[in-house]
Image (cartoon, grey):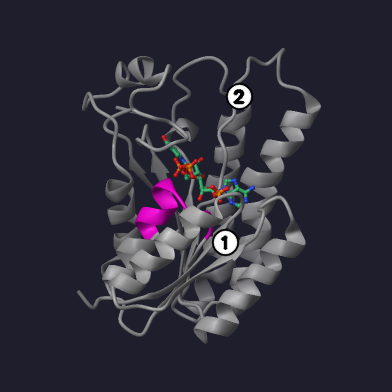
Amino acid sequence: MTEFAGKTALVTGGSRGIGAAVAVALAERGADVAITYNSSPEDAAAVVKQLEAAGRRGFAIEADAASAEAVVAAVGRAYGVLGGLDIFVNNAGVGSLGMIDEVTLEELDRVLAINVRGPYVAAQAAAGVLADGGRMIHVGSAIAERATGPGMSLYTMSKSAVAGLSKGLARDLGARGITSNVVQPGPIDTSMNPADGPFAEAQRAFLALPRFGTPAEVAAAVVYLAGSAAGYITGTELTIDGGHAA
Ligand code: NDP
């Protein structure tokens, strides 16, 4: 598979879960891929091995999404080492649960720093180096379409912000032929939201397809948006949610 032969990509939060699946899927289709990670160097190294096993260049950069300095440096390093940047996947994020009267200011600031400020700063840095005709794909959440239960106000707000960021970028970057879209997963079986976790049954009850999705199913959507078939798609949402919003 050579759809992305000669292309370069950066995936934030590529050490585990959805980001790891996206990085591997891009490499399997010919791209050289950099990933960022925060707290899982061993997982990041294992993903790099998979990128190399696909016959591509791959490397991992430690960059806490809450640190603007680290994020900007990571984008610069990916661009420098890969020799360009064609595809930027804004994926790093954290979950957060809490009723409106329980969420502390510290938690509010932590989640917004990682899920909103980090993706904004990363997109800003990536926009500065992305090749004309390039692709930005942000990982939001289906929860931005339909909040299905209590305790999700902070996380939902943060993912709605990602959808807004994506639309604004589509307008800012369209003249350069760069597309910006948001992928909005429903429940996906990762360590953030395990299919056998305490909240899994309640989530399954909202789905038309009564199962969790897989990271590979989200990666397939990212691959589509990164490819030439999606050249006229920008400023929109691709929701992969098993019918969560149906
Ligand atoms: P995981 O917890 O499995 O993986 C999260 C990834 O993000 C890891 O690579 C992690 O790196 C990285 N990350 C976390 N915090 C930071 C940080 N401060 N700085 C840099 N990287 C960080 O989660 P998922 O794969 O499930 O989630 C990926 C994205 O998908 C997130 O944005 C999430 O909100 C979104 N999403 C997930 C859904 C689900 O049901 N799983 C549903 C909808 C959206 P490290 O381990 O090195 O810290």
Residue at the spot 48% in from the left edge and 23% down from the top edge: 147
Q: Residue 154 carries which label?
A: none
Task: Find residue 160 and report its image quarter.
Answer: top right
Instruction: Name the quarter where the C terminus is drawn.
Output: top left
Task: Find residue 204 and report its image quarter.
Answer: top left
Q: How far apart are marks 2 and 1 (CA)?
A: 24 Å
Rendered location of residue 69, percent (x, y): 76, 63
Magenta-colored span: 12-22
Amino acid at pointer 2:
Ser
Task: Find residue 159 and report its image quarter.
Answer: top right
Residue at the spot 47% in from the left edge and 35% down from the top edge: 192
Nearer the observer, disc 2 or disc 1?
2
Callout 2–callout 1 Cβ contact below 8 Å: no
Task: Judge left or right: residue 203 versus residue 59.
Answer: left
Rendered location of residue 73, percent (x, y): 69, 70
Residue 233 seen in the figure:
no
Dot 1 corresponds to which residue? 169
Residue 18 among magenta residues? yes
Rendered location of residue 105, percent (x, y): 80, 27
Residue at the spot 27% in from the left edge and 47% down from the top edge: 217
Task: Judge left or right: residue 75 versus residue 67.
Answer: left
Amino acid at pointer 1:
Leu
Task: Judge left or right: residue 144 versus residue 61.
Answer: left
The correct choice, above or below, for 103 with respect to 116 in the image is above
The correct choice, above or below, for 164 with respect to 173 in the image is above
Rendered location of residue 114, percent (x, y): 66, 45
> Furthest-front residue in view?
42
Residue 161 among magenta residues? no
Ligand 1 near label 2 (Cβ, under 8 Å)?
no
Using a 10 Å C-alpha cutoff, classify the residue at mark 1 as few (fewer than 14 neighbours), some (14 to 19) or many (20 or more).
many
Dot 2 corresponds to which residue? 153
Going from N to C along the chain, the mark reached first, 2 or 1, is 2
